[in-house]
Image: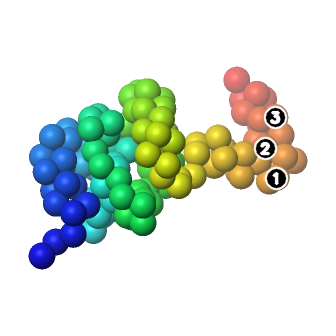
Amino acid sequence: MADYSQLIMGEAIKEIDRRLVDKCPKYQRCSAPLCPLDPDIDKRFYIKGDPICSLPVEELIIILNRRFKKQYREFAKVCLEKEVRFRPFKAVQEKKKKHPKYEQLQMKIFTDMG
């Protein structure tokens, strides 16, 4: 018998925009009940200990495109309400700022081009 969270995920996935899900490279193996691609994430259940979406934020940005900001904000809000541990987008952005000289070099090259 499948556990409760998998049953909920199975029902929930029927409602998710299929085009978004098809673009997710981890969808076939994913068992996370809260999917950042799900527009109705606030209607989903999460039980402490359930898996968490492991799709990198960079890939989410590519998949969601213009809807990323709104959809990710909703995902973060629901995760906080349901006390789900996840890596917030700001933490991911700050983590990438390890090499400020390299970033400045990139910016200088970019500004010289334009």
Q: At label 3, which amino acid type do we have?
A: Lys
Give the residue displayed 22% in from the left and 55% down from the top: 9
Q: Which label belongs to residue 108?
A: 3
Q: At label 1, which amino acid type do we have?
A: His
Give the residue displayed 49% in from the left and 49% down from the top: 83
Q: Nearer the viewer, residue 3 or 29?
A: 3
Q: Position of residue 33 (x, y in %)?
A: 30, 55
Secondary-structure class at tag 1 = loop
Residue extending furthest toward the top: 114
| Residue assigned mark 2 | 103
Q: Position of residue 6 (x, y in %)?
A: 22, 63
In the visual, does 45 lie left or right of 19? right
Q: Nearer the viewer, residue 94 or 73?
A: 73
The quadrant in which residue 68 appears is top left
Q: Relative to 92, is 114 above or below?
A: above
Label 2 Cα neighbours within 10 Å, binned few <14 / some 14-19 / many ≥20: few
Q: Nearer the viewer, residue 79 or 111?
A: 79
Q: CA distance from mark 3 to mark 1?
A: 14 Å
Q: Which label belongs to residue 99?
A: 1
In the visual, does 75 lie left or right of 94? left
Which quadrant: the C terminus?
top right
In the visual, does 107 lie left or right of 90? right
Q: Position of residue 55 (x, y in %)?
A: 43, 56
Circles 2 and 1, Cβ within 8 Å, touching? The answer is yes
Label 1 Cα neighbours within 10 Å, binned few <14 / some 14-19 / many ≥20: few
Asked if residue 84 shows in the view, the reply is: yes
Q: CA distance from mark 2 to mark 1?
A: 7 Å
Q: Which is more N-terminal, label 3 or label 2?
A: 2
